[in-house]
């Protein structure tokens, strides 16, 4: 019982996930600033933003559906927090491993996008409704490449359990090189999932005010923001576990530091992409995902199948 | 001040998100405000972010005299912001109405419509002056509690 409480409240639950996601947001913003030749925000910036938003007035618009409007931020927060329990962090085992937990993690990471859609739609403001529609269109574009690119390594390992996958890749380290292209595709899809700059179409502030989050303020916005940060860390942990599966037998201290380094590496790649690219239009984004990225992911799936048939017994 | 309100006040000072609204300026002040937001001046050092929606913002940065056309909209945007909120008037026109004071279509400065916390004069106010004004507003918050803005609203009616 004490162990379960420790897992939920401290590691890898509430405390660790919150602190690490705020740190990841700081690393993201600081790197972005450094790449633009700026000084960037101080280390406590995400924490100060969070506390300030918690202390601000909550406004629920008169025309909004107040139940769904106020419920969605906590659902997004809970879903991303739950994903941490099924992802192998610094060991080959996750905290609560079970067969085919890969599918559960992928679906838990989809829930935030659905909450953005529902929250934006039921705010019943023009801008948030446009943003919500764009969020759901974008979901259909990036979700297939993401699932395919993670399915290929899973198929090569012959399992849908993340823990068994990490064990398999610890024994066959060279097969990781085969999945490097899948890693690139998963990164692009993760950018879409996190609604970061080349794909920040649902919250495009130069077109539709703040998109899905237009009507959110105060505590509700604070929880949406920390849910997005947590989704970034959970998504990066998933990519680190699937595509960078090495160094799981280093023991607690070194292994934990290596885990942090791997996640921050993925976050750094995301912020690099955020700095380099400008926002695409929604039709360009759909074209990119359906015409180029999804077929490439299919092709890599076939390559992995052939390799599995010939090399891995 | 208790410890909790001290932490909250610290967070408010360290993370002022702004929204920019042109109430009828000639665009000179707007260009200077945009220049202040560029990487050259890097106001993200102070935690300042430009937000698109009044719901997210803490500081309303206004430029220009309040014309009859924009007065209702300015009040509406001010009311859409969540408490605690502050208003900064950038440029001479925003401070007093400037050369357009008592024009047939101009009501006066920003404070003729909504309460203003900081005035930044200049025609146009330079980016350095704008950053200086915002930092002065934030340091003035250190002394008094941030709920003071509510009182000014009540006294101004």
Image (cartoon, helix red, strand yellow):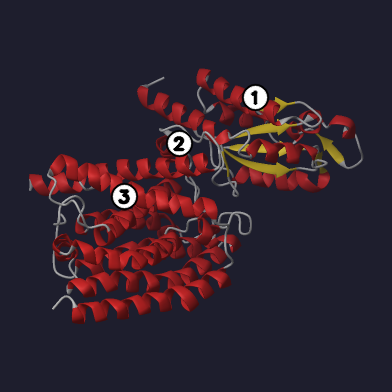
Mark 2–mark 3 distance (CA, rounded to whole Å): 27 Å
**Distance (Cα) linking label 1 and label 3:** 38 Å
Q: Residue under circle 3?
A: A263
Residue A199 position, x and y percent, is 51, 61
Chain of residue at mark 1: B
Q: Are marks 2 and 3 in contact (CB under 8 Å)?
A: no
Image spot of residue A102 (x, y percent): 23, 67
Q: Which residue is mark 2?
A: A52
Q: Label 3 neighbourhood size at 10 Å, few (<14), some (14-19), many (20+)?
A: many
Pointer 3 indicates a residue of which chain? A
Residue A14, can we see it?
A: no
Residue A298 horizontal/vertical position (percent): 36, 79
Q: Secondary structure at mark 2?
A: helix
- Tag 2, which chain? A
Q: Is residue A233 above or below residue A63?
A: above
x 45%, y 58%: residue: A66
Circle 1 is placed at which residue position?
Answer: B132
Q: Quadrant of the C terminus of chain A?
A: bottom left
């Amino acid at each position: 019982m004490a162990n379960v409480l420790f897992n939920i409240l401290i590691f890898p639950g509430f405390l660790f996930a919150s602190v690490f996601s705020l740190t990841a947001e700081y690393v993201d913003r600081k790197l972005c600033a450094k790449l633009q030749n700026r000084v960037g925000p101080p280390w406590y910036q995400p924490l100060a933003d969070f506390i300030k938003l918690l202390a601000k007035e909550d406004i629920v618009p008169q025309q909004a559906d107040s139940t769904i409007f106020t419920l969605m931020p906590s659902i997004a927060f809970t879903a991303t927090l739950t994903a941490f329990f099924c992802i192998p962090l610094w060991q080959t085992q996750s905290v609560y491993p079970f067969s085919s937990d890969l599918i559960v993690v992928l679906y838990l990471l989809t829930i935030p996008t659905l909450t953005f859609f529902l929250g934006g739609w039921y705010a019943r403001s023009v801008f948030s409704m446009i943003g919500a529609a764009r969020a759901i269109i974008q979901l259909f574009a990036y979700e297939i490449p993401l699932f395919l690119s993670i399915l290929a390594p899973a198929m090569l390992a012959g399992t849908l359990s993340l823990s068994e996958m990490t064990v398999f890749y610890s024994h066959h380290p060279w097969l990781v090189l085969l999945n490097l292209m899948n890693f690139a595709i998963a990164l692009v899809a993760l950018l879409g999932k996190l609604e970061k700059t080349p794909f920040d179409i649902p919250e495009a502030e130069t077109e539709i005010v703040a998109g899905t989050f237009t009507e959110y303020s105060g505590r509700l916005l604070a929880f949406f923001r920390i849910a997005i940060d947590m989704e970034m860390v959970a998504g990066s942990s998933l990519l680190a576990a699937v595509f960078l599966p090495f160094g799981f037998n280093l023991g607690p201290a070194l292994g934990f530091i290596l885990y942090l380094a791997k996640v921050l590496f993925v976050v750094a790649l995301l912020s690099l992409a955020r700095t380099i690219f400008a926002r695409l239009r929604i039709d360009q984004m759909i074209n990119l995902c359906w015409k180029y990225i999804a077929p490439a992911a299919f092709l890599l799936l076939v390559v992995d199948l052939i390799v599995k048939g010939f090399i891995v017994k | 001040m208790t410890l909790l309100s001290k932490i909250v006040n610290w967070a408010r000072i360290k993370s002022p998100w702004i929204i920019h609204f042109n109430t009828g300026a000639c665009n000179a002040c707007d260009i200077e405000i945009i220049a202040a937001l560029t990487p050259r001046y890097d106001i993200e050092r102070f935690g300042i972010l430009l937000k698109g929606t009044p719901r997210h913002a803490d500081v309303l940065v206004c430029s220009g005299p309040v014309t009859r056309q924009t007065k209702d909209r300015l009040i509406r945007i001010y009311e859409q912001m969540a408490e605690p909120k502050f208003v900064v008037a950038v440029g001479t026109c925003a401070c007093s109405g400037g050369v357009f004071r008592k024009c047939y279509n101009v009501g006066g400065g920003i404070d003729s419509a909504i309460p203003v916390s900081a005035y930044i004069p200049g025609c146009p106010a330079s980016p350095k002056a704008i950053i200086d004004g915002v930092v002065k507003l934030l340091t003035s918050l250190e002394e008094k509690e941030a709920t003071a803005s509510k009182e000014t609203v009540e006294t101004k009616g």
